[in-house]
Amino acid sequence: MYKNGETALHRILELVSKCPKEHQQKCFEVLLSGYVQLEVGASTPTGSAAKANITAQPQAESLQHETHIPPPVLSRFKNTSKRLGITLDKLESLFDFSVDPFALHPVTLPGKNNAEKTRQIALLAASRSYLTTGSWSADWQEVKSLCIDYNCYDLPNHSVALKKGGGTLFKNVEPGKPVELSSDGIKEAEKFLKNLSEGGLA
Amino acid sequence: MIPSSDQLESFFERLNKLDRDLAKLKGAEVRNIVIIAEIKAVSKEWLRISEALRVAEALPQENLNFADAHFKELFQCTSARTRASAYQKKLAPVLSSSTDRIVVPVIRFEGSPSQVASRQLLGEFVGKVTAEENAYLEEAARCLSSRCNRAAIIMLWAAAISRIHGAIEKLGFNAYNEALDQTTQKKGNPFNRVSKTSVTSLPELQRCRDFDLLVVGMALWKYDLQVFEELDRLLGIRNSAAHPGMLKPSALDVQQYASKVGSCIFEVVPA
């Protein structure tokens, strides 16, 4: 770059001197910027490598800039989205990362009654727990709080709904203790997460 | 200790039962000692619950003041001849608004992501820690739930060092001094950075640098250089959290720190 800079500058000044005085400054700027562009253009890589660079760089940058997923859990989000066959954006859209720690965005629960909705909430809470800590267990109090938000908290039947209708979804349901998901429960939670991310948002 | 929403629900269920018992008296003067004792007991119980909720700032103060006033009146009535209907009149406003004013705010408070994170932090160490270490961890969890993330990191490290001190005390200071000698005889980093300070008591051990304990730990508990390096990184984070600077750990960072402390200290150094 700028191999013959001195000669080029002399040539530019020569040309500038031929211009009327009032246009000399503008002329100098135009010629110099033209020379600089020519030199910079010549030094950029050409061919497929250059093309790959041009396309890959913005992609990597946009991925870094667009995602709001905190770095400590990003790899778990990526793996989960890959496993579920959905894009990272869709999985990300289920959660609110503007709060610390991140929370669930409101979704439309497809459950027919309070008991079914309560179980779906437990699956959602367990999914959030998995993405945060790697453990598929729903915090008892978080489930209750979400049930209040979704208007499906039924005090006398809350734990019964989780115990009875759960079938093989949960390993254990004890009031006050985390609700651990069984392997069937994990499959169901992943399926539920996939369905929600593919258009279940409220 | 903050009362849980489950405890509150059973408390208000108890109150409902008391109301049903009073209704059976059909407005007559309450002379039954058992019922009067129950009225006194629930009033005192509420004052304990109210105080704990007030400290935790789990719900608006006016909600607590409202309930406090009614329970205070209820308790005062027990020292006079009072009809069942009068007791019921004082109970009615509390019972009708208990769910909206007290139970629901507490459920929302304890189900908030920061409270969940603090319980998850404690969950990392279940069955791995002693009562003394657990006290530090509980403080770390409280810091995390109050969004004091740097303080939480410091308390987690305090729990880790408490484990190391306890383990050295169990092994005996002679064993520690021997391991220290072995370590200082080795050449190169990090062995040449260990200060040769032998110890004969816990206070002396408490004055030792954490870094030295981590290096000597390789000889005592046979963990390798990679585990040491991870521990040294954790010590670095702890130091950054404890000194002025721009470190701003998130709740997730604290949870990750807790998980590493759990696996590198509590699963490696025996209690």
Image: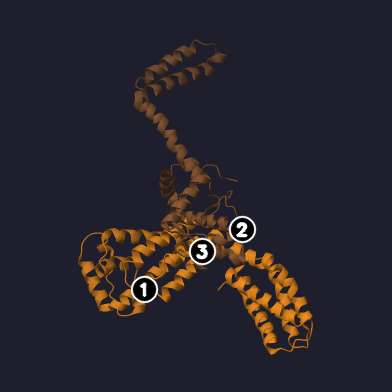
Chain colours: A brown, B orange
Quarter of the view holding residue B8: bottom right
Q: Amino acid at mark 3?
A: Lys
Indicate which disc residue A163 carries.
3
The image quadrant where one finds the N terminus of chain B is bottom right
Per the image, the residue denoted by label 1 is: B207
Q: Chain of mark 2?
A: A
Q: Quadrant of residue B90?
A: bottom right
For disc 3, the chain is A
Question: Is label 1 on the same chain as label 2?
Answer: no
* Disc 1 from disc 2: Cα separation: 56 Å
Q: Where residue B25 sits in the image (x, y, percent)?
A: 75, 83
A72 or A81: nearer the viewer: A81
Q: CA distance from mark 3 to mark 1?
A: 53 Å
Disc 3 from disc 2: Cα separation: 16 Å
For mark 2, give the secondary structure.
loop
Q: Are marks 3 and 1 on the same chain?
A: no
Comparing A57 with A125, the one in front is: A125
**In the picture shown, does residue B167 fall above or below A179?**
below
Task: Give the mark toward the camera: 3 or 1.
Answer: 3
Q: Earlier in the sequence, mark 3 or mark 2?
A: 2
Element class at badge 1 = helix
Give the structural element (helix, strand or loop) at label 3.
Answer: helix
Left/right of residue B230 with respect to residue B23 in the rendered view: left
Amino acid type indicated by mark 2: Cys
- Give me the chain letter of mark 1: B
- The residue depicted at 79 percent of the width and 82 percent of the height is B27
Can you tell which of label 1 and label 2 is closer to the viewer? 2
